[in-house]
């Protein structure tokens, strides 16, 4: 059974169906959650351990291929959780 496109979490590096991850994009060089598929994006599980791993490993700049501003972890975590809530 096909579960849709697979994406890699930039935190834990697991390949999962895109439906399990939250897409991140850039808005004026600042990382934001997005549902748009235009342009370069990054994917992250809405879990603290994945967010911490992505920040610690500087995965955001690598994923977007340029220096970026990452919001404070608690703000980004709230935005990730908001994308998951119905």
Image (cartoon, rainbow, N blue to C red):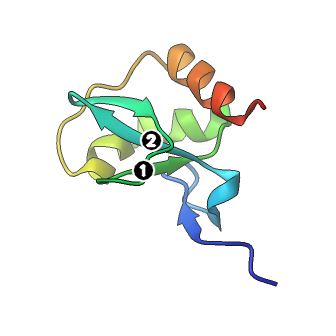
Query: Which residue does the numbered mark 1 point to in the structure image?
Result: 42
Q: Position of residue 53 (x, y in %)?
A: 52, 40
Residue 51 is tagged as none
When the figure is inspected, residue 14 is found, relative to residue 2, above or below; the finding is above
When the figure is inspected, residue 83 is found, relative to residue 39, above or below; the finding is above
Q: Position of residue 65 (x, y in %)?
A: 21, 51
Report the residue at 62% width, 60% height from top: 18
Query: Which residue does the numbered mark 2 point to in the structure image?
Result: 24
Q: Is residue 53 left or right of residue 62?
A: right
Q: Nearer the viewer, residue 10 or 40?
A: 40
Q: Position of residue 81 (x, y in %)?
A: 68, 28
For label 2, the SS is strand
| Distance of label 1 from label 2 (alpha carbons) | 5 Å
Residue furthest to the right: 1
- Ranked by sequence position, the earlier of labels 1 and 2 is 2
For label 1, the SS is strand
Report the residue at 51% width, 23% height from top: 76
- The reply to whether the C-beta atoms of the residues labelled 1 and 2 are less than 8 Å apart is yes
Residue furthest to the bottom: 1
Q: Nearer the viewer, residue 58 or 4?
A: 4
Which corner quadrant holds the C terminus? top right
Report the residue at 37% width, 46% height from top: 59
């Amino acid at each position: 059974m096909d579960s849709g496109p697979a994406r890699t979490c930039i935190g834990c590096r697991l390949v999962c169906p895109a439906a399990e991850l939250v897409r991140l994009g850039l808005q004026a060089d600042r990382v934001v959650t997005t549902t748009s598929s235009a342009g370069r994006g990054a994917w992250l599980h809405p879990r603290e351990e994945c967010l911490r791993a992505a920040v610690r490993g500087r995965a955001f700049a690598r994923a977007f291929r340029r220096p970026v501003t990452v919001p404070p972890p608690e703000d980004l975590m709230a935005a990730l959780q908001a994308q998951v809530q119905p």
